[in-house]
Amino acid sequence: MTTLTDALRELAEARTELEIAKEWTAQLLTLVKAMPAYQKFSAAQDSELDLVKAITVADLRVRELALKEHLWSGSYKPAGGVQIKEFSKVVYAPNLALDWCIAHATKYLQLDTKAFEKAASVLRDLGAPVELTKEARAQIATNLSAWIQRPGVIQGQMETLLDSEEINLLREEQDLAETWGP
């Protein structure tokens, strides 16, 4: 059976290993981002985002002009590839609709549970059917370093990875790129 102490130790060690893994990942990402291939990829990705923005702007402009043409001519096909469709839209004044629902259709009214719970103590004193109770919840400290007993497994794995042949080749490629340029 796992004890609270064992569980805290396990949590503390896992959190520490995650932080180490994040640090190593950041270091690897820095190496990769310095590579010419990544820089080309990043430029291609930026171009793609620019095209998506341009398409969004053009799409909005086509819709705007198509609706203007529809209003002027009444045509439901103002241009090839564009069609005007009509959809039902409900328009009402919320305060008038609320008053009407209170008087005629209470089933369409809904309790604002968030506001009700926030005001529960005051509403209880006014006779509302609400009860206030206590609920125990465990809160765990952010820093559990006092519970760590063993060195992180992930740290050893990351050190092995950073000393691997592939990473050394990445570093050499980065050094060459810095020396000779793109």
Image (cartoon, rainbow, N blue to C red):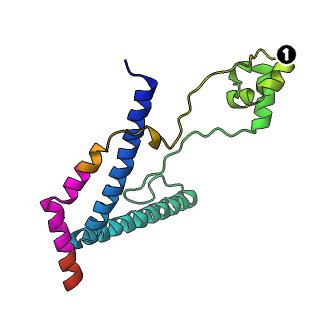
Q: In the image, what residue type sits under mark 1?
A: Gly
Query: Observer-nearest residue: 152 or 161?
Result: 152
Screen quadrant of the C terminus: bottom left
Left or right: where 138 falls relative to 20: right
Q: Quadrant of residue 89?
A: top right
Give the vertical position of 109 relative to 148 (above or below).
above
Residue 46 placement (x, y as % from top left): 35, 68
Secondary structure, magenta segment, majority class:
helix
Residue 141 placement (x, y as % from top left): 53, 39
Range drawn in magenta: 157-174
Q: Is residue 71 visible?
A: yes
Q: Secondary structure at mark 1?
A: loop
Residue at image position (82%, 23%) is: 123
Left or right: where 147 falls relative to 94: left
Residue on which the image places disc 1: 127
Give the vertical position of 27 relative to 132 (above or below).
below
Residue 152 placement (x, y as % from top left): 31, 44
